[in-house]
Amino acid sequence: MFSSDVPRLDRPLPRALAPDVDRDLMAAISHLEDPFARAGLTILRGTGLRIGELLDLELDCLWDFASHGTWVKVPLGKMGTERSVPLDAETLAAFDAWMANRGCQRALPHPRHGQPAYFLFVERGRRLSGYRLRRGLEKAVAAAGLTGRDGAALRVVPHQLRHTYGTTLVNAGMSLQALMALMGHVSAEMTLRYASLSSPTVRAAYEAAMGKVKGRQALFVAPAGKAAVPDRVEWLRAEMLKTRVAYGYCSRDLVADACSYANICEQCDNFVTAPEFTPALEQQLADIRALHDDAVDRGWDSEVARHARVNASIEGHLRRLKNSG
């Protein structure tokens, strides 16, 4: 038997709360009577912690950095890894409120190694469980008047606060590498599920296409017997991220962002040219300069910088060809 013989598990998308539901729910949580539910749920939403990680926090879990604010050190948990997560003002206030309410508590044996530990969430000498968090979440849903399509109270579980945290960050533009570190994922595949919910790029592409349809703008269709590549003048004027390549043109839609492979060969240290390619390089240089000016006019700063690098590289290749001749 090989690993490929094992059936792949289903990969459901993270069940994040809709923005309006998230807003109303967190407002209701801030008014819960139970101080543990109020603080614990706020911290779960503001840090993306799992319930087990929250309950295992110790008194020394907060780290203050003069230049980077306050962070929470997340203990070893489900994935056997440690990490730290930055705190915003609201989440830090929840920590402070609970510590003021906690009072003095004795050390308790740690379930992982048996050594005494001062856990953060302790009351009357006992560690708190996730029951009060789930109960507090049910009360907050009822207080906020959140209902499903059937009219019954919306079912929300604490882990959805973690999904909402991750989804909000990736939709705001956070890189998957940074999100992977914050969420404590041990594989990129786990984090990639959140990329499926990163809607702004897909939405922008959809709206751009629908704008052409609704505005009855002609979509590009190659006429029979003619090339599907626009002429040079039309290409230079197009509202696209343009790249001049050796044997043609690249027209990349704005929502796709700049291509990381654009003109990579011309800038590579291993790129070697010869005198017979001088005319092609000169033509490419002329286009690069035109693209640079076009990007300046459109305010595409990253494209201006990219074209400037390519321009300098090709000019260097042409100088070397001239000196060698």
Image (spheres, rainbow, N blue to C red):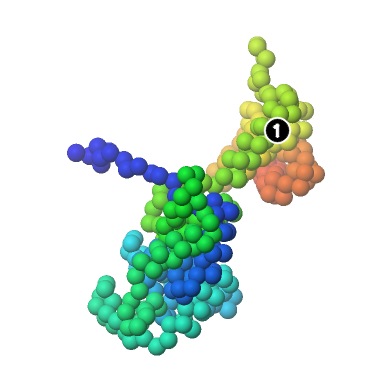
Quadrant of residue 287 within the rendered picture: top right
Whether residue 39 is visible, yes or no, is no
Residue at the far front in the pictured view: 151
Q: Residue at x 45, y 73 (%)?
A: 34
**Left or right relative to 114: residue 219:** right
- Residue 191 position, x and y percent, is 44, 52
- Residue 263 position, x and y percent, is 62, 40
Is 33 rendered above or below residue 50?
Answer: below
Is 199 rendered above or below residue 247?
Answer: below
Looking at the figure, which quarter contains the N terminus? Answer: top left
Quadrant of residue 279 within the rendered picture: top right
- Residue 243 position, x and y percent, is 66, 37
Q: Foreground: 83 or 12?
A: 12
Q: Residue at x 32, y 43 (%)?
A: 9
Residue at the far right in the pictured view: 297
Whether residue 288 is visible, yes or no, is yes
Is 36 rendered above or below residue 273?
Answer: below
Q: Foreground: 126 or 301?
A: 126
How many residues crowd around disc 1 within 10 Å: few (fewer than 14), some, or many (20 or more)? few
Q: Residue at x 68, y 49 (%)?
A: 302
Residue at the far left in the pictured view: 1
Q: Residue at x 22, y 39 (%)?
A: 2
Q: Foreground: 229 or 279?
A: 229
Q: Foreground: 236 or 105?
A: 105
Q: Amino acid at mark 1?
A: Gly
- Residue 277 position, x and y percent, is 65, 31
Q: Which residue is mark 1?
A: 211
Looking at the figure, which quarter contains the C terminus? Answer: top right
SS class, disc 1? helix
**Left or right relative to 233: residue 5:** left
